[in-house]
Amino acid sequence: MQEEINILFSCDSNYVMPLCVCLTSIFDNNTNNKINIYLLHSGLSEIEEKNINNVATKYNQTINLIHVQKSYFSDAPALRWSKETYYRLLINELIPKNIDRLLYLDVDIIVNKPLNDLYNLDLGEYYISALLENTDYKKTRARLGLNQDGFYYQAGVLVFDLKKTRKILSYDKSMEVIHKLGKNLTTVDQDVMNIIFDGKIKALDKKFNNVSVTIFDGNNIDRLLNKINKKEVLETYILHYASSKPWNNLFSGSCEGIWYKYLKLSPYKNLYDEKFNTLKYKILRTGLVKTFFYAYIDITPFINKISVSMLSPHLYASLKKFYRKYIK
């Protein structure tokens, strides 16, 4: 008998292609499960919706496209993200009330195994489960106005017990937290999640959200030669390309071959031969070139912060759009 697994995504047009790759990896590794996808968006083109639905049709799975009114989070700061990153906070408002458990996933991941073990995780008295973020917990919690006897969690992979979370998570509560934080809000919805669910988050095993295996380490000779830890990859359920994206020109990470595997099974498979399999990208993916780009990735947040403070919102948005389209 198939197990039913409910998964939530949110994205805009800039991330439809990686979303389709992610969905392909989910469906390809969960053929014995019934997967229900809930995709929150504020506006996708007809061709984008068609490509998304084609992935589900290919694997005989279900995708529910939920259009989100632009009035939601209209005055919330997006910083270097899009407003869609906040949409995971709308579970109480937009997800069917008959669903008791939900798995949220970022689009920059590859699902490497069946999701049953993650989806059925025993949360005990906790409301959600998330990966511990690699940060200075005391400093981060102080910024959020929380006591320093606790942790800070990443919001890229989340398991929700909706019976519990609906009691405290809502749009109004989220906006209250956002306004209260003001300039102390730095990682948008992730900060909000950590405040609302403080003390109610169970630490997630790294194998369910492995960020480190996709990061290029210039000090590691194996990574310099583009070698990966095959044993670690085999044991990983979810590879999270949080630090750098395999579809970007300036990719400085690792395990891109696994991401390309599912790209070639997706509606965007033509991109592999047209772009990623060309000589240019084979050179860009060498360890020596990645070493240079790795330094660039480290200073990107600083460049973004300076640009926001010095440029008008219109000019900043225009330059960001140009950068995403023609450079990154």
Image: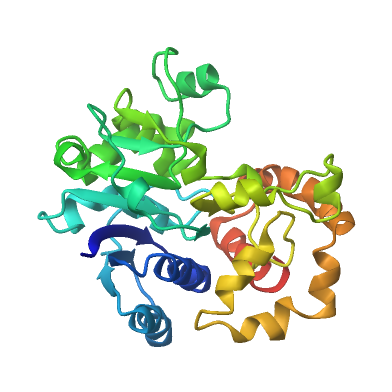
**View extreme (front): residue:** 1
Residue name at image x 64 percent, y 53 percent: 311
Instruction: Tell me if residue 150 comes above or below residue 298 in the rendering.
Output: above
Is residue 295 shown left or right of residue 163? Answer: right
Is residue 244 shown left or right of residue 173? Answer: right
Q: Nearer the viewer, residue 133 or 264?
A: 264
Residue 49 placement (x, y as % from top left): 37, 81
Residue 221, image quadrant: top right
Q: Specify the quadrant that holds the C terminus.
A: bottom right
Residue name at image x 51 percent, y 24 percent: 140
Q: Specify the quadrant that holds the N terminus.
A: bottom left
**View extreme (left): residue:** 98
Q: Nearer the viewer, residue 80 or 165?
A: 165
Residue 266 placement (x, y as % from top left): 51, 79
Is residue 257 shown left or right of residue 30? Answer: right
Residue 114 placement (x, y as % from top left): 40, 58
Is residue 288 shown left or right of residue 226? Answer: right
Residue name at image x 40 percent, y 43 percent: 189
- The answer to whether one can see residue 243 in this image is no
Residue 321 placement (x, y as % from top left): 60, 68
Q: Which color mode does the image show?
A: rainbow
Q: How many marks?
A: 0
Residue name at image x 38 percent, y 76 percent: 44
- The answer to whether one can see residue 162 in this image is yes
Instruction: Tell me if residue 114 comes above or below residue 200 in the rendering.
Output: below
